[in-house]
Image (cartoon, rainbow, N blue to C red):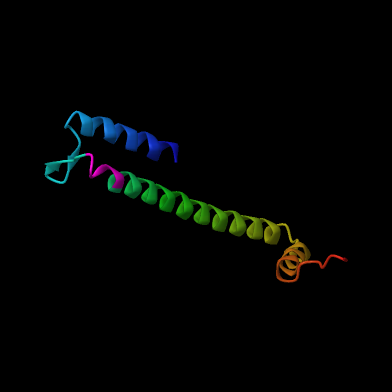
Amino acid sequence: MIEAVAESITALALIAMHREPLGSARATFGDWPEMASGTLFWRVIAVVAFALLLAGVVQLVRYRLLKHAHRDHTVAAVHHEIVAPHKTEE
């Protein structure tokens, strides 16, 4: 997110110097909010996609390591814990 903010501030400075391109023309201060929000949106999408991919890889590796170590009972216990969490007494 810091990178998106830095990029947006840099774009703002370049717009002030009339050096920021927007297609084949130069960007104006009126174009900046859309440019900044688009940059932030795509950075968030990239981070979320990477986090989901990483979570999937971690789960796959953990499962494969447990299977390789012949700890099927641990795999079953973890699966059971996820499907039916313990109920707390009130």
Left or right: 21 in relation to 49: left
Relative height, residue 75 to residue 7 (above, below): below
Note whether 67 is above or below 46 in the view shown. Answer: below
Outermost residue, left side? 24
In the image, is residue 47 part of the stretch drawn in magenta? Answer: no
x, y percent for residue 57? 55, 55
Seen from the viewer's position, the closer of residues 52 and 70 is: 52
Of helix, strand and loop, which mostly describes the magenta segment?
loop
56 or 74, which lies in front? 56
Residue beneath the point at 39% across and 37% down: 5
- Asked if 37 appears above or below 7 in the picture, the reply is below
Query: Residue at (19%, 40%) from the top-left corner?
Result: 28
Choose top left, top right, bottom left or bottom right for residue 83: bottom right
Asked if the stretch drawn in magenta spans residue 32, the answer is: yes
Please provide percent x and percent y for residue 14: 23, 31
Range drawn in magenta: 29-33
34 vs 26, left or right, is: right
